[in-house]
Each structure stands twice: as structure tokens, then as C-alpha cells.
Amino acid sequence: MGSSNYILQNDLYFKEYVQAYTNATYIVSDKYQDTEDLAGFFSGWQPEHGAYDTDNWQYKFTQKGESQIKTEEASTARGGSRKGSSGDVYHEQHVMPDAQEGQGLLPHAHPSQIQHDETMQDPHCVLQILKRHYARYTPAMVSDICGIPQDLFYKIADTLVKNSGRERTTNLSYSVGWTQHIIGVQMIRTGCILQLLLGNIGRPGGGVMALRGHANIQGSTDIPTLYNLLPGYLTMPSAIREEYDYQTYMEHNDQDSGWWVHYPEYFVSLMKAWYGDAATKENDWAFNFLPKVIEDHSDLPMFVSMKDGKMKGFFLLGQNPAAGGVNAGFHRAAMEKLDWLLVRDLFEIESATYWKRPGIDPTRIPTEVFFLPAASHVEKEGSFTNTQRLIQYRDQCIEPPDDARSENWFITELCLRLKEMYQESTKERDKPIQAVTWNYRREGPQQEPVVEDIVKEINGYRTADRHVVKDFTELKADGSTASGCWIFSGIMPEEGKNLSRRREPDNYVSLDWCFTWPANRHILYNRASADPEGKPWSERKKYIWWDPEHKNDDGSTGRWVGYDIPDFPVTKAPTTQANPTGSGVDAHSGASPFIMNVEGVGRLYAPSGLTDGPMPTHYEPIESPVRNLLYPVQYLIKRGNLMGIMVFLRIQPSALVAKPARLPVSNGISCLRMALR
């Protein structure tokens, strides 16, 4: 935040990039007030809900397609309001309660509606708001809060600036020092803002990189392991948002502009992959087969529920909470409340043997524990997806010993046995088990599922003849295609041709080394590697550019070319004007690189999609022994309540000595009480 202030106050940002490719020129509602105005809160804080009403964080709008007619409301193709919880109705501008990955409950404003000031001098434009917001983050303040000497701060800030711009780029690489930190989201978001200001997003050598803890954390997020997501970063339906029917779910997740206009194609194709002929237009593509989020089901709240006796059984694969949890004693005590626990790992980890630790009487623990030995990565076929989104296939080297089996074998056996168990059931709740498709071939001495069949399903195919689709642009919302994860589509563009097996490097991008999602694009938003006219920012940083003379197969001329696959419509000229009434990327101009965003530009200021504020601001971590020097607000605690909203409780230092029961929260906070004792 101090670096951002240093760059802004000294006009060291990459002006051409910021003006063209970010929302710096966008004008925000007059109703917006900053943390600098409200002693640490953004405007819209609703104590009764423990969350922000984000209505006044929004842009200032005009009528759709009529840039001179001012209005406070954004027009929308859907209209109406967004459903909330507990009888409350939340205006559609409000942030989605649990801050999913970008889409869903966004303000459905058409880009043509948003007012701009190209000079970036209007006091309500994003750049000026950003300047005021970070003005107090001076080198002296940074030094007082962080302990870094001011001369070292200046050295770091100057290094960032000198290695950014037309000729150079800087990359920010972070690991668990940011991720596993109470204010880690604020840090990472600040890094993104810094990189946008310096012009380091969408360009070679730039970006913000998460250094994963092991080889496939990215892949396990993509498919995914997170409770609030479906594969490919689609949103899990939520009872909190009253998404009990397909229409409401789509109203909350589809959008008019940007690439997420294709959300229905990806969702319907996923349901066809999972439920086959049982997913039809008449039954809303089996939408009711999906579970619905009812509260925060992330790791710690899940174990709180377990400790409270709300969970009967637990499958534990690839995790060891009895040793690696934030409170190992609490996690072990929670698992003692289970009726049964199944653990799959390479050896008997602590979570499989917690019941016989010193000082514990196993006879007093009712949990039945099953331990199933797992195959290691050299004993099974599969892939690793690294932080660059590069999917690298790997073959099985040796057979697993004794009873050890792969996850594919275990999940297949579990699914098929459950289907057999429930095949005669007439209960509505059992239909998802009966309907789920599981038709993978099996081979070898252990009858392992054929992994290439799984790859084909993930890639996608036509349901009529099961021929593979070439990529996600061929997926349809009419039930004619199936795909297990749209972002991976293209990994098998032809029958039996698994691109993640490729091993053909070159001296630069190496497009023929395995497969990078999406569509083998190695740098996301790489349209930003060229200036608004489509020319490289410099010869040294040349990456993707517009070739007006390129002859296309359809007889037209002009195409984006370069060292990578363009993350942009390949024949859309840089001079293309945004269609003021268009949808999808037609609503964006030829100089709008950030195709996933509604606006088509990078967000220095986020009017929606985040629950803690449109910009990062400094709060002390909960464990901090020092007071917040910036605001009376000491720190924030993030958790999900029964409304599904990520709640931010600003607690004064005096609360640390108060009885925990006085904290203005209810269910699911026993872990906090333990921490404060």
C-alpha cells in the first residue's frame, strides 16, 4: 500500500497503460465514502447484517448506450432484485455474499453505461479515489507499522518503478507468507493493484504469481476442492442466496458483457457430463441434483460443526488436520465426535491414529476409523497443474504395493457400490446417486479406470456421437455437449490426442510443451502486451501484436499474432468500437484486454465481487500485539455466518480483555472464543 501511494503521489505509474487498460478513468457514485472519511470503514457498513451494503460503491451510470444521460441506477437485462436470506431482499448491486471468483451477483451494468473522465482529474474518478485512499501510507507510516527502514522502502519502491514500463516488467511472486495470513487477501489484492499501476499484467515477465506448496495445488483448485465452487470456477448453488431453482441461479451468475456471458454453456455442459441423459431442459439440467451451500463450509468452520456433533462421517483424502490444522488439538477433539472416519494416505498419519495418542482412552472415542493405503504419484497415472496453469501429464511408473490404490480406483469403487446400493430406491434424495454417470473403462491387474476417458470427459464431447469438441468455444447450452471442466477444454482436441503429454520445448514460450488452460494461453489477458493501437509497447517486450495484413481463412485480413495464443478474439481489430447495446465481448472495444470482467479493463477499484471493501486497507492481524496506527478499527475477522456473507467484525483493542461471549456474533465462533481465552 505504501508502494502504491509512492507511485501515485509521484506520478510514476504507467500512464498510457493505466488510462487505457484499467478503470482509473471510471467515475464512482457520489454516495461513496472512504475509510479515510469514516475512521476505517467504507460507506455502507450494516452492523445488523455484519456486512457491507455495496450499493454506493458502484460506478456512476448513464442509460444503456446513451453516454450523456445520467442516472443513479444501472439498467439491466434482468431487472428486479437479488434474493438474499432470512426474508431480506438485497439490491442487485450488492456484493455476492461469499465473494466467489469474480462472476455472480455482479452489477449487471453495460460498459456503455459507466461514466468516464479520460483526464483522470474528476475527484470521483477511480484514480483520484485511489490517491486519496492511500495518501496516508507514507514511507514514515510504513516504517512505523512494518518496521522497515525508510531508506530500504525507497530502494524497493524505486526498484519496482525502474523495472516497469514500456521496456521492462516486474513479477510479484508470493507464497504462504501472504496466503496463510489473516490479512493475506488484502496483501494479494494490493499486489494486483500495484502491478496494474505499473503496467505489469498481461505482459511477459509481469503478473502476480502464487508459489504453490506442491505440484498440483492449482489443479486441485481448478477441478476443484473448494466447497463454494464447481469445476472451472463455476459457482456452487447457494441456499443462502435462495438459489433453489435454475432460473434464479442463472440470474445470479450469468452476465451481459464479458466472457462470462457463456456461463450457461459451461454449466449445462458440466451437468450433461455428470448426469448424462438424466439432465434435460425439462428438469433444468438436473439442477436440483446439486447440493446447496447453507453456511461457511471451509476448513475451520467445518471442524467446528464436527465438534458440535453435526457431522456423522468424514472422508479424509490428502489432508492431515490432526497435525497440519491451525489448532491440532481442536481438530483431533472434533474428529472424536464422528461416527466414522475414512483416511486415505501413504502411511498412518496422525489423523488416522489420533484416537491412540498419549493421554487418551480409545474406549471413550466412538469413532470407527478406516485406513485405506493410497498410491503415490509414481504409482498412478494422472497430471500435475502448476501455478502457471500448465497441465503436465505423467504415466504410471510402477504398480502400487499390496492394497494401495489410486484415488481414481477408490472413487470409482465407491461410486459404483453406492449406485448398486441405491438402485432400487424410490426416494427423491437418492436420484442424484442413481443418475450420476460413471462409464469409464477399466483395465490392468487392479482394474484401474482408464484415465484417458476422464481426460476426454473433462475436455468435452458432443452428446450425440461422443466425438470430442476442439475447445470450450464449441460448448453449448442446449444439452448437445458435455464437459467436466470448461477451462480444460482443448486438452484433447482430437480423439486420443492428449496435448498434456506433449514434450516439445522451444527457446521461449514453448507452446508445444504440455497444455496450459485456457486454450493453451500462457499469459492471461495478453492483449495488454500491446498498446491500444495493437503495437508492442516496445521491441524488447514484444509478445502479442496486431498484424493488419494477415490473411485469414475466411478471406478477411487482420489478426492478433505473436509468441502466445491470444487471450482475445483473434480477428477483433484494435480499432473496433464497443457495441453500446452488444453482449459478451461485443460490448468491449478492441482495446479492452480484460475479457472476463464486465468492464473489459483491470480493476484498481472493485465495485463488486469483494466483501471487505472496493480497495485494500490496513487492519492489524488478530494476533498483533500493537494497535492500528491508521484507524481506530483494530483488526478484522473474516468468517461466514448463516447468511453466507463473509462477515468482518471490527473489534477495538478493549475487546481483547472482554469476555468472548460479549462479541456480537453467534453460531460457529467457538474457535474464536478459544483463541481469546
Image (cartoon, rainbow, N blue to C red):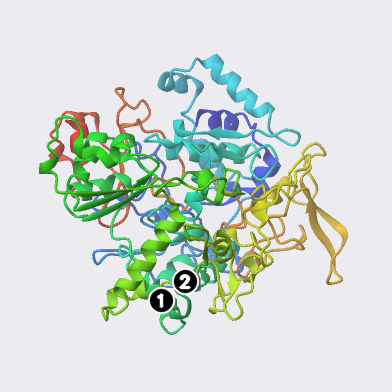
- Which residue is at a point 51% across and 42% down the rendered structure image? 129
In this rendering, is residue 170 above or below 243?
above
Q: Residue 286: which numbered mark, if any? A: 1
Q: Residues within 10 Å of mark 2 (few under 14, many from 20)?
A: many
- State left or right for residue 600 relative to residue 625: right
Foreground: 221 or 498?
498
Residue 658 at x, y = what percent?
14, 32
Q: Secondary structure at mark 1?
A: helix
- The three-letter code of the residue at mark 1 reads Ala
What's the CA distance linking mark 1 and mark 2?
Answer: 7 Å
Residue at numbered disc 2: 271
Q: Is residue 172 visible?
A: yes
Q: Secondary structure at mark 2?
A: helix
In which quarter of the view is residue 288 placed? bottom left
Name which of mark 1 and mark 2 comes first in the sequence.
2
Residue most extreme to the bottom: 282
In this rendering, is residue 18 above or below 72?
above
- The three-letter code of the residue at mark 2 reads Met
In this rendering, is residue 451 above or below 322?
below
Residue 406 at x, y = what percent?
45, 52
- Which residue is at a point 38% across and 65% down the rendered structure image? 415
- Which residue is at a point 64% across and 32% down the rendered structure image? 11
